[in-house]
Image (cartoon, helix red, strand yellow):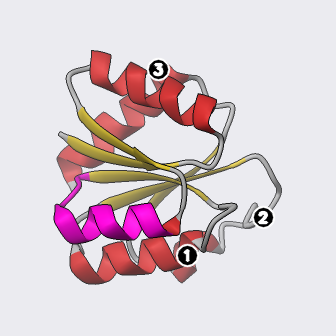
Amino acid sequence: MKVLIVETAPELGRLWQRHLERQGMEVRLEHGQPGAAAALSAQRFDVIILNVILEEGSALAVADLASYRHPETQVIFVTNTSFFSDGSIFALNANACAFVQSDTPPDDLAAMVEHYGRSG
């Protein structure tokens, strides 16, 4: 399974990346919209783990690009804020499959990636 992580905090992104790689997944880590856009231009991913708040660029632009280029790719949005806590993220992006807090345990996140990656 191919996973793209777009996470501004390098240590958190690497934590998720290592955990998913131990589960046998192929993972690419990017820290902002430019890198994510390049990744989406180069290949298809089964799942994208995408922080709602990026320091460089827009998470919604990344999700829209994924939806356009790879409509079957599932997007798991993560945040440490109350943005979109009303569930409105699902109305903004057709590929949104989950919305979780950034402190979700890596095992739980891996289970979600496995579930949505297989159903996408």
Q: Mark 3 or mark 1: which is in front?
A: 1
User: Mark 2–mark 1 contact, CB under 8 Å?
Assistant: no
Horizontally, residue 118 falls left or right of residue 57, namely left
Q: Mark 2 or mark 1: which comes first in sequence?
A: 1
- Is residue 35 shown above or below 116? below
Rate crowding at label 2 as few (under 14), some (14 to 19) or many (20 or more) other CA atoms within 10 Å: few
Q: Mark 2 or mark 3: which comes first in sequence?
A: 2
Q: Amino acid at mark 1?
A: Leu
Residue drawn at x 56%, y 48% is 7
Tell me, yes or no, whether the highlighted magenta stretch contains residue 21: no
Residue of label 3: 107
Task: Give the Cα distance between marks 3 and 1.
Answer: 26 Å
Residue drawn at x 72%, y 67% is 84
The label shown at residue 60 is 1
Task: Give the Cα distance between marks 2 and 1.
Answer: 12 Å
Rate crowding at label 3 as few (under 14), some (14 to 19) or many (20 or more) other CA atoms within 10 Å: few
Rate crowding at label 1 as few (under 14), some (14 to 19) or many (20 or more) other CA atoms within 10 Å: some
Q: Helix, strand, or loop for circle 1?
A: helix
Horizontally, residue 11 falls left or right of residue 69, namely right
Residue of label 2: 83
Task: Give the Cα distance between marks 2 and 3.
Answer: 24 Å
Q: Position of residue 106 (x, y in %)?
A: 51, 23
Q: Mark 3 or mark 1: which comes first in sequence?
A: 1
Q: Amino acid at mark 2?
A: Phe
| Magenta span | 34-46
Q: Main secondary structure of the magenta part?
A: helix
Q: Position of residue 3 (x, y in %)?
A: 30, 45
Q: Helix, strand, or loop for circle 3?
A: helix
Answer yes or no: is residue 96 visible: no
Tell me, yes or no, whether the highlighted magenta stretch contains residue 38: yes
Q: Amino acid at mark 3?
A: Asp
